[in-house]
Image: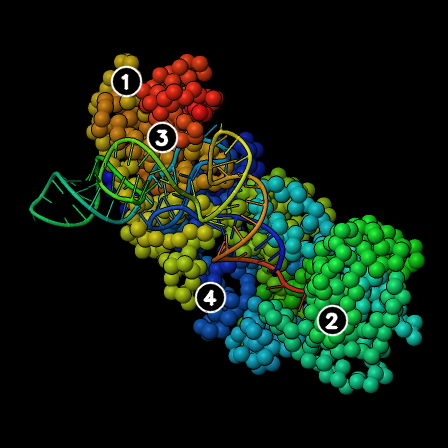
Amino acid sequence: MEYSKATDLKWHAFWKNERLFNVDIKDTSKPKYYCLVMFPYPSSELHVGHARNYIIGDAVSRYKIMRGYNVLSPMGWDAFGLPAENQAIKHKIHPQTWTLKNIERIKEQLNSWGIGYDWDREITTCFPQYYKWTQWIFLKLYQKGLAYRKEAFANWCPSCKTVLANEQVVDGACERCSTKVEQKKLKQWFLKITSYADRLLEDLSLLKDWPEKVKIMQINWIGKSEGVEIDFPIENSNEKIRCFTTRIDTIFGATFLALSWEHQVIKELVKDSINKNQIEEFINKVKNQPLSARLVENFEKEGIFTGKFAINPLSGKKIPIWIANYILTEYGTGAIMCVPAHDKRDFEFAKKYNLEIIEVIKPSQHTTTLPIAVFEGEGILVNSGNFSGLTSRDAKEKIAFYLEEANIGRRAVNYKLRDWLISRQRYWGAPIPIIYCDSCGEVPVPENNLPVLLPYNIEFLPTGQSPLTFAKEFTQTTCPNCKRPAQRETDTMDTFVDSSWYYLRYISPKEENVAFITEDVNRWLPVDQYIGGVEHAILHLLYSRFINKFLYDLGLVNFPEPFAKLFTQGMIVKDGFKMSKSKGNVVAPDYIIDKYGADTMRLYILFMGPPQKDAEWQDEGLQGAYRFLQRALRLVDVLKEYNNTEEGQPLNSFERALLKKIHSTIKEVTVDLEGDFQFNTAIARIMELVNQIYKSLNEGFLRKSIFYQAVDTVFLLLSPFTPHISEEVNNILGNKCSIFRRSWPLYYEEYLKEEEIEIAVLINGKVKDKVTISTDWDKRSVEEKILSLEKVKKILGNNTPKKIIYVEKRLVNIVV
RNA sequence: GCGCGAGUGGCGGAAUGGAAGACGCGUAUGGCUCAGAACCAUAUAGGUAAAACCUGUGGGGGUUCAAAUCCCCCCUCGCGCACCA
């Protein structure tokens, strides 16, 4: 038979009819398996790089179906978001029209590749049936004090009159118009993810089946550090400046303080400074530096002296207070005790402004001299009063204790993690369900008034304010409390809020009264296998974990983590670059499907290399996959015409060898799939089996029953990868039911047994010969045999072996 | 700067302490063919045409009977984070 696109279409219809991927979630007759591929952002049609993701998920689902699981494999659309809006503006169509058009196209693509989903569970985040519950989750967070509004700085382009995401700021300027970006303070909504920082960190230990890399990225992102907060009294004042440090052991080396330009104490501090004007100038300069300027490699440290001094509470030393551009307002207390001898940044700053450097830590007791350079490690304290001589570790403890006793400091923990800013001054998102009333203030929309519908007819060109501001029929409402006229919040939510809970919605996608049914969700989650790109390692995966934990605390779900197992697939690159339209290196799947059929593409993508690693696309590889499939299919043609029977006769050596190959292949392919999805090696082994079938046919006699078994096994093992062809062959071989209703093949150890085996003969670790031995020989017989070999005798000559190492079934090493 | 990952034929890769290069691509030779494509067969790390031998998994050292694999030092590339005190 010839394989072509026509084969594909036939089986797509069949699977749909069979309802192969439609799940009855109440069915408990089989164990459940929730296989989830990260849902796409429908911004353009998919290329082969995207395809890899879905093909992996489909192979896993089909394999698990054959292993007897009730497999849930749903699909949906992360449909809100800025790119849709930008594209809509560009093409002068409504974001919804644009998004829905893309969804149709992508759906068509997924279907054409034979990716199986339970389409009855399709969800689209921009539909009110979905975002009603996104808003509901927001309200729940609000009720618990985990959603709040505060003023915060954001990147602002004065020309485009809009807030920009950090990613849209290139070298301090707007990526579109190159206008210098300013920092503008806006009232924004935040979710208090920081309340969950510790649990998000701790519970990573529950995620045994997550890639280490992703967990490390999350650990770094959360960035927990333990240290001490210490108060520095200001000279001639009752005020104090509180600093956070992880290196309290270096306190005696603190020779100046540095404040962030936003620190509240500055106003009071500089009110009668002689250089007040210069200070203000400096603050303005720093203020207008975009956040992104800090990211530049050699961001220059700058500062200005306030004219005031603080007292180092331990050394009693009078130290100058500076304002410096490298101090972060958001981290710790926004004020730093600077120890130039033991901190690179402080060192750099002290050098520049000629500030005192006092060495207080020596690398070890025996070091007598230290050049004037920074030593950031831990060691032994010197020049540290009563604490001199202690190790850093002991000193940290003892100084912290002393500070607490003296009530001038305390142990403290800080995180890098910031609260999640979810306000977007954009149209295409879920409205934040809040109403502002002149008399009642900020009022949440009552749950029974949800959803707050996103109005359809809107002028959404960017003006600097949320487009919703101009929709009077949207903004004007009445206060739920006092029934007086009130205004709606006009910002929409970050799309990451939409995607932080979608995996729950798939269980009951059409439910109108609740976001999800706890009982069902508790049975189907956590997700058994989550599959997606590593680019979501932090944002999406951290947000989802946070929201899940929040729902857990409300008692709405009973699992602390939403995704039990995570698989992050590698990118497909072409000519060394990630595929992108601008690079012009996108490989579109359509022509591949037309020319070779979906299974060829699927097989090649899975065969390219380990799925977690990046892979380089090569058209020739596709050709190879096609060739293999045709070669395998030709066996089916041979089998149809095959009449050799010798049933009842004992098996000949070719038949025994082939049976052994069949069973070892089943074993190895199963191991590869149960492991870390080693599709590439699994496919290689199936190719070996095909090669051996040809060899057996060409070289020896093969009875039909064994030939049949071999061919049947090939296509059973291939079926998760190449479902169309496998289904076709299954049908030709006379099976009435779908190949996916059959069980995954089992192997029998009895076929794997060997009577004779070839082992390697090594002398001093180098292979010199090979010899066939019986598997039941003991070490002594093997040694005797080896030493009698002509080649071995020749090499050994008069030397007698010092030692003979026999590794069963593998080799013998003679040490001379 | 810190963290993670990787480095193996002409290419994608296999082998996680036991015969380096499975499987595939490419290439070569032969078969089939009027011819080509396709297909089939054989070969394919290097020194080398072959036997024998030697060398060989980024570089250097070590552990071991035995190292691509484990340990130490270094180099290169990719990714992530990046003034977090």
Label 2: element kind = helix
Residue denoted by label 1? A652
For the N terminus of chain A, give its image quadrant: top left
- A768 or A625: which is nearer to us? A768
Is residue A248 something one can see in this rendering? no
Comparing marks 1 and 4, which lies closer to the viewer?
1
Residue A713 is labelled as 3
Q: Quadrant of residue A586?
A: bottom left
Residue A328 in the figure: left or right of residue B2: right
Q: Position of residue A5 (x, y in %)?
A: 30, 48
- Of tags 3 and 1, which is closer to the observer? 1
Which one is in front in this view, the residue at disc 2 or the one at disc 3? Answer: 2
Instruction: Give the image location of residue A406, x and y in percent.
Output: 93, 58
Marks 3/1: CA distance?
20 Å
Task: Name the side, left or right, on which A38 lies relative to A753.
Answer: right
Percent position (x, y) of residue A438? 77, 74
In front here: A616 or B47? B47
Q: CA distance from mark 2 to mark 3?
A: 73 Å
Query: Nearer the N terminus, badge 3 or badge 1?
Result: 1
Do the residues under discs 4 and 2 have CB atoms within 8 angstroms?
Answer: no
Kindly state the secondary structure of the residue where label 1 is placed: loop
Residue A729 screen position, x and y as percent: 31, 35
The chain holding disc 1 is: A
Write the residue at 54% across / 56% down.
A535
Q: Identify residue for label 4.
A: A98
At x 89%, y 66%, the residue is: A316
N-term-proximal mark, 1 vs 4? 4
Judging from the image, mark 2 belongs to the subunit labelled: A
Upstream in sequence: badge 2 or badge 1: 2
**First in residue order: circle 2 vs circle 3:** 2
At label 3, which amino acid type do we have? Thr
Q: Say the numbered circle drawn on residue A350.
A: 2
